[in-house]
Amino acid sequence: MALNPELRLDRRAVLLAAGGLLVGCSRQPEIDKIHLRLATGPAGAVYRRIGGALAERISEQVPGATVVTVPSGASTDNIRMLRAGEVHLGLTSLDALITTDGSVPEGLSAICRLYDSHLHLVVMAGSAIGGFRDLEGKRISLGARDSGTEFTSLRVLKLGLVNADGRYLSQAESAAALRDGEIDAMFSLTGVPTPAITELAQRHPIRLIPLDTQADALFTAFPGPYTPAMIPATAYAGVPATRTIAVPNVLLVRNDLPDDLVHAITDTIFTHTGTIASGGRDDAEAVPEAWQINVRTGISTASIPLHPGAAAWFRDRKP
């Protein structure tokens, strides 16, 4: 898989930029700009916010680099764009990436694990839906097409033998449709808290349906990417702690990006986590999920191999 001609990088520029960062030069050489594209997610999703924060930090910290974000359906859409050479970097949930035989798409590797998403099943407070089985025949948002939400929610429904009237809506669209009575429930595989659900809960009482039984079923059927988890009571206004499923998210990269550049990107992520999480100078751009980024869990990408540049950075961190 060759990278699209429009996305090819100048090798000399990459090496000079990454080298200047790694050796801490006070005077940077005059270099060509490095233009990178990072696939994120739909409106109202954490992918959109954390992708924007990562792009901003990388553009600031890697000399000569400029990263622009590309909106998408999320996980599987990002994987498709990476494989097609339309982007250089992309966010994905681990379960959408690993096939049932444990293999991963050719030509891709991981920079790091970022944070864990939690599967939300949201209904309005007055809904007659009291549990997972009550979804039978109901109008349910499965997330945007090609998203991690779609991927995981379809697995959950299939394992639970529940037939629902599935709709394909982004997180923001799902929250609006739920509020307006156009759907009965919405799935959302996302960080905690997530903007679309936070805004809905601030204006209208909602409930989260427990998914502990479904977490056990997923863990048994697909060992590796799933763990039982809890959405805390502090996440959304008026909503008690709720048991659910957690799925790690990773930052993917094409294998044909130079090692030195990926090393520099990895260094930026782990040395500027606080700025990414806090939103830098703008508190409105805070990404609390980014506080989960750390060296100990960052290397844990399951069967997804690390890009050699990222692997070298983690080796350098060992005492």
Image (cartoon, rainbow, N blue to C red):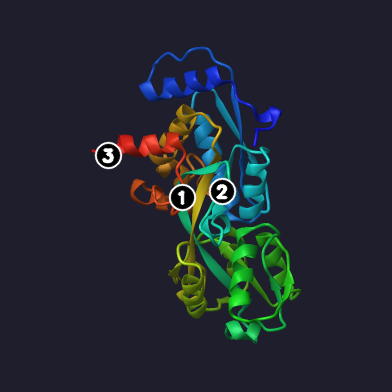
Amino acid type for the residue under numbered disc 2: Leu
Q: Secondary structure at mark 3?
A: loop
**Residue displayed at 54% across by 56% down:** 98
To which residue does mark 2 refer? 91
**Residue displayed at 44% across by 40% down:** 269
User: Considering only order in the chain, which callout, 3 or 1, is on the residue closer to the N terminus?
Assistant: 1
Q: Say left or right for 1 vs 101.
A: right
- Horizontal and vertical percent for residue 182? 76, 74
Q: Is residue 286 visible?
A: no
What label does residue 281 carry, if any? none
- Horizontal and vertical percent for residue 7? 66, 30
Q: Say left or right for 255 vs 80.
A: left
* Cβ atoms under marks 2 and 1 closer than 8 Å: yes
Q: Quadrant of the N terminus?
A: top right
What label does residue 114 carry, if any? 1
Amino acid type for the residue under numbered disc 3: Lys
Decide which of 304, 124 is in the foreground and name it: 304
Numbered disc in front, either 2 or 3: 3
**Residue displayed at 64% across by 54% down:** 76
Image height check: is 100 above or below 184?
A: above
